[in-house]
Amino acid sequence: MALEIERKFLVTGEGWRSAPSERLSQGYLCHEPERTVRVRIAGEQAFLTIKGITQGATRQEFEYPIPVADAQSLLALCGAGVIDKYRHRFVHAGKTWEVDAFLGDNQGLVVAEIELASEDEVFDKPDWLGEEVTHDARYYNANLSTLPFVHWNKAAQAE
């Protein structure tokens, strides 16, 4: 079984900006608590990804390459909820970090992720990491596609 164990943090500093980046576009064909089905274009590659329910920081993940033309057609089915972002990748203390700087309705949100071998794995944190948001569902990309960052204050005021 393919498992993803991931921790997610807000970014407070600028130390990540020099890392190489690539533009990603992704949308969700299925967005339910038990599963998501995502289509993503990353540069000249495209993927279809199925993820199971998150338990702690762990969930099942299955990812398959697909033709870019197919991904473009599938993204069109996702409507207005397509997420655009730049992903910066770099290694810090032997671990790969991915920093997503969001565009569009999620502009201003910057989140760092690290994949681990176990939920209790110890790792060194870069000095520009802020609050951990691993368990805050608002920061899941699937949720950002339906309630973008720019609307968070409006949604909180309506409650």
Image (cartoon, rainbow, N blue to C red):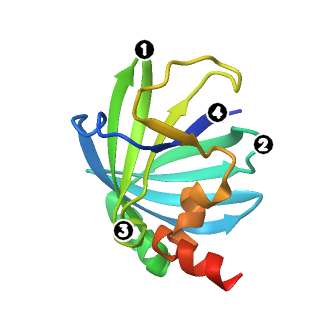
Mark 4 and mark 2: Cα distance apart in space: 10 Å
Q: Do tag 4 and tag 2 residues touch (Cβ < 8 Å)?
A: no
Picture coordinates of residue 14, whole percent (x, y): 29, 40
Q: What's the residue type where badge 3 is placed? A: Gln
Q: Do tag 2 and tag 3 residues touch (Cβ < 8 Å)?
A: no
Mark 4 and mark 1: Cα distance apart in space: 17 Å
**Which mark is drawn over residue 5?**
4
Circle nearer the N terminus (3, 1): 3
Circle nearer the N terminus (4, 2): 4
Q: Which residue is farthest front?
A: 157
Circle nearer the N terminus (2, 1): 2
Q: Which residue is mark 2?
A: 55
Mark 3 and mark 4: Cα distance apart in space: 28 Å
Q: What's the residue type where badge 1 is placed? A: Gly
Q: Do tag 2 and tag 1 residues touch (Cβ < 8 Å)?
A: no
Q: Nearer the viewer, mark 4 or mark 1?
A: 1
> What is the secondary structure assignment of the residue under circle 4?
strand
Picture coordinates of residue 126, whole percent (x, y): 42, 26
Q: What's the residue type where badge 4 is placed? A: Ile
Question: Could you tell me which quadrant the N terminus lies in?
Answer: top right
Circle nearer the N terminus (4, 1): 4
Q: Which residue is mark 3?
A: 72
> What is the secondary structure assignment of the residue under circle 3?
helix
Q: Which residue is mark 1?
A: 94
